[in-house]
Amino acid sequence: MFIGNLQELDDVLLHPLIAAVLRDFVATNADVLELPKGKIDLTVPAQFAPADMPKDPLFMIVSMDTSQLVTERRAEFHDTYLDIQLLLSGEEWIGIGPHTVELDRADNPHPDLYFMDEPSTTYVGLQPGDFVVIAPGELHTPLCTLTEPGQLRKIVFKVHKALLAPSA
């Protein structure tokens, strides 16, 4: 897991594709609060396109959600996609860990979304402009609050793990 802020992209070491996705987003979206909610397919930069391109290799989901108390949220993980979770407005706490996931113990209600009843061990507070990079298999609990539920707007970029392979 990696935590950063859009204002500091030039000062951090990120996988080149992750940095490219975030830089392109900043360069092409002057008013991020006006983006429509829902899934938006993104173009994979040519230098990161594998020979055998997977279905839905790169997209983002724009959402408006209400945070919930940490005791009301379940931990989740993904097997196929890396998440870049970017907070646009509001305040969000994301739970991290424990670091062991077991597919056979997880509920799988949607493709590449697994839930576990494991409490997170650490919580990270996000403010607008902050992002978290979450690798496949990393247990996390998004959309949390430590106090009162509130509205937040965020984008989750989904990067297929095939795009991150050394041969890509």
Image: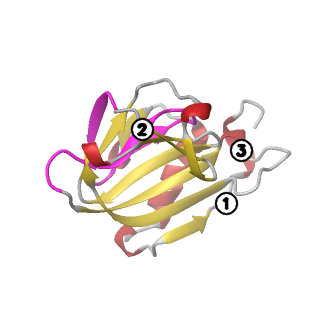
Label tally: 3
Residue 135, above or below 36: above
* Residue 140 counted in the magenta span: yes
Q: Secondary structure at mark 3?
A: helix
Tag in front: 2 or 1: 2
Which residue bears the numbered disc 3? 48
**Looking at the rendering, which quadrant does residue 141 occupy?**
top left
Mark 2 is surrounded, within 10 Å at the Cα level, by few (under 14), some (14 to 19) or many (20 or more) other residues, namely many
Residue 113, above or below 35: above
What's the mark number on residue 140? 2
Among numbered discs 2 and 1, the one appearing first in the sequence = 1
Q: Quadrant of the N terminus?
A: top left
Q: Are the two marked residues, 3 and 2, in contact with CB atoms closer than 8 angstroms?
A: no
Residue beneath the point at 49% across and 51% down = 22
> Of the residues shown, which amino acid type is indicated by label 2?
His
Q: Secondary structure at mark 2?
A: strand
Name the side, left or right, on which 51 lies relative to 93. right
Residue 97 locus on image (x, y percent)? 40, 29
Q: Is residue 126 visible?
A: no
Which residue bears the numbered disc 1? 43
Region rendered in magenta = 120-148
* Residue 110 counted in the magenta span: no
Residue 40 locus on image (x, y percent)? 57, 67
Residue 13, above or below 30: above
The Cα atoms of the two marked residues, 3 and 1, are separated by 10 Å
Give whichever of 47, 102 is nearer the camera.
102
> Of the residues shown, which amino acid type is indicated by label 1?
Thr
Q: Is residue 8 visible?
A: yes
Q: Secondary structure at mark 1?
A: loop
Give whichever of 162, 123 is nearer the camera.
123
> Of the residues shown, which amino acid type is indicated by label 3?
Phe
